[in-house]
Image (spheres, grey):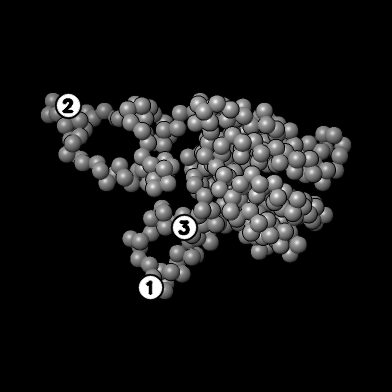
Amino acid sequence: MTTNAKSAIPNHVAMIMDGNGRWAKQRKLTRIKGHTEGAKAVRSVVRTCRNDGVKFLTLYAFSVANWSRPRPEVRALMTLLADFASKEKVELREKGIRLSVVGEIDELPTFARRAIESAIEYTAGGEEMTLSLALSYGGRRDIVHAAKAIAAQARAGLLLPEDIDESFLRAQLSTRALPDVDLLIRTSGESRMSDFLLYEAAYAELLFLPIMWPEMNEDVLRQAFEWFANRERRFGLTTQQLRSSSLPLDANGQPLSAGAMGENLSRSFDPEDSRDEITPQPSDTRCSEAVPEGTV
């Protein structure tokens, strides 16, 4: 991949790996066989993201709602997770990929939790990419847990209302070590978020693919990156603003989140500078409604 192509690669890619069961049903196979084939797609995606320069990859491996599935299927999924962690950790470390988990790893069966924790420790030194598995994860629940943590600090007298801002809330989430999502991909043709990274994907580009997850491969992923490169990400600004200046960056050199960007702009805005533009003249008989130049 060329240098110019690499510059358009999303920093944080998140994926909802949907369609394993339907892929298997179409072929008169068991759902478990579909999940086994889906694991092969995971390996392809991880390698492609690492090779193309993605820094953060987050996979929706097992949601809170998935605990309601048939027990044999849940057991099979936990076994696949444990096998992935045990078998892939050597390659992950060789490729400089650090494994992490968002969600509630303590809710997993002991054998799966131990295998994943071992892989996390084994790959801790990886600096090329962070692979995060969302396990027993729910976006709403994560936000509720964050709210409870904030309430407990306030009740203990350790926190004032004015101390709470976007950054403080983000620090209470299980995803606190991850940047905002740039590109969120869902397979299977479904067009919904399913409680995945609701807060973190506020300004993500959303791509819903008609293929099933086992059909995801290097070529499809690179087509998704090309699609992303052609998107105009405005973060609430207008096209003209984007073209006249670069987006502000945070301490890590990444674009500020939309909320932080808005706070910066609001602090620097002086109403006196635009009073002549927004105050109707005496001759005006009515006020016209301002129409924004761009959409969010």
The residue pinned by badge 2 equals: 284
- Judged left or right of residue 233, residue 214 is right
Quadrant in which the N terminus is drawn: top right
The residue pinned by badge 3 equals: 171
Q: Measured along the vertical axis of the image, is residue 159 above or below residue 98? A: below
Distance Cα–Cα, label 3 vs label 1: 19 Å
**Which residue is painted at 42% across and 57% down in the image?**
168
The amino acid type of the residue labelled 3 equals: Ala
Give the mark nearer the N terminus: 3 vs 1.
1
49 or 39: nearer the eye?
49
Q: Residues within 10 Å of mark 2 (few under 14, many from 20)?
A: few
- Judged left or right of residue 29, residue 209 is left
- Judged left or right of residue 168, residue 142 is right
**Which residue is painted at 70% across and 51% down in the image?**
89
| Residue that sits furthest to the front in the current view | 94
Q: Residue 76: image x %, image y %?
A: 80, 52
| Residue that sits furthest to the left in the current view | 282
The amino acid type of the residue labelled 1 equals: Gly
Give the label on residue 157, or none: 1
**Which residue is painted at 42% across and 46% down in the image?**
252
The mark lying in front, picked from 2 and 1, is: 1
Label 1 secondary element: loop
The answer to whether residue 81 is visible is no
Q: Residues within 10 Å of mark 3 (few under 14, many from 20)?
A: few
Quadrant in which the C terminus is drawn: top left
Give the mark nearer the N terminus: 2 vs 3.
3
| Residue that sits furthest to the right in the current view | 28
Label 2 secondary element: loop
The mark lying in front, picked from 3 and 1, is: 3
Q: Residue 242: image x %, image y %?
A: 37, 30
Q: Residue 278: image x %, image y %?
A: 21, 33
